[in-house]
Image: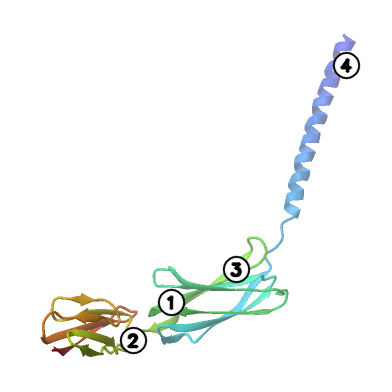
Amino acid sequence: MNVVYSYELMKRTTTFFVLALLALTLCTATAGASSTSTACNVKIVKFTVNNPTGTAPAKVGFTTYTAGNVTSVQVQVLDKNGKVVASCRSYCTHCTVKHICNCSLTLKNPGTYDVKVTAYGTGSCHVEQTKKSAITIKAVNLVPNFTCSASGKKVTFKDASTGAAKWSWNFGDGSKSTLKNPTHTYKKAGKYKVCLTVCNSGNSCKSICKTVTVK
C-alpha cells in the first residue's frame, strides 16, 4: 500500500514539475520577443514643393526636412482620383539628426495634383504627410499652323504649331495622316483644302485649314 502511494505521489510531482517548466519556458520566450521591439524614431518636420505651378511639361522639385533615424524619403504625386502619376525618392546616409532630402520630377500632363511624402526608417517604420492640391500644371497655349512645299504632285507638310502633342491631317482628297510632318502624293493636279488638327497634352484641340495648289 505504501509503494502505491509513493508511486502516485512521484507521478503527481513529476507532472507538476513538467507543467511548471513548460510555463516558465513560454513566459521566457514571450518576454524575450517583446524586448526586441524598438520605437519608430522617424519624423517629417516639414516639406515644401518648389515651382508648384507651371506649364506642361513642368519640372517640380521637393524638399523634405526630417528628424530621427530616416533612411529614405519618397515623394508621390497623385491625381484627383488618388492615382500615383509620378514619384521620386532620395536616400539618406546619415540621418540621425535633422536631415534635408531633395528630389525632382517632370509632370507632362496639366492638372491639379496632391503630394504625399513618406519618410522611412529601419524595417517597416515609416511616417507620411499629404498636401492637397499642392501642384497646378496648365496646358501650353495651343496655336495650330503648318507650311508646305510641293515638287510636282508630291507635297511635304511641316507642322508649325505651338503646344501640339498630337496631329491629324486631312489632305483634301480623302487621305489622312497622324504624322507630325507627313509627305503626301496627289494623283491629280488641282487645288485641295488641307486641314490640320492639333491637340495638346490636356487633350484640347484646334484646327487650321489652308488651300494647297498641286500642279
Secondary structure at numbered mark 2: loop
Q: Which residue is labeled 4 in the image?
A: 6
Q: What residue type is labelled 4?
A: Ser
- Total labels: the figure holds 4
How much space separates mark 2 and mark 3, taking CA atoms?
Answer: 40 Å
Which numbered disc, 4 or 3, marks the residue that appears first in the sequence?
4
- Number of residues whose C-alpha sits closer than 10 Å to that of mark 4, classed few (under 14), some (14–19) or many (20 or more): few
How much space separates mark 4 and mark 3, taking CA atoms?
Answer: 64 Å
Secondary structure at numbered mark 3: strand
The reply to whether residue 211 is in sight is: yes
How much space separates mark 1 and mark 4, taking CA atoms?
Answer: 82 Å
How much space separates mark 1 and mark 3, taking CA atoms?
Answer: 20 Å
How much space separates mark 2 and mark 1, taking CA atoms?
Answer: 21 Å
Residue 109: x percent and y percent? 39, 78
User: Can you tell which mark lies on residue 163?
Assistant: 2
Cβ–Cβ under 8 Å for marks 1 and 4:
no
How much space separates mark 2 and mark 4, taking CA atoms?
Answer: 100 Å
Which numbered disc, 1 or 3, marks the residue that appears first in the sequence?
1
Mark 2 or 3: in front is 2
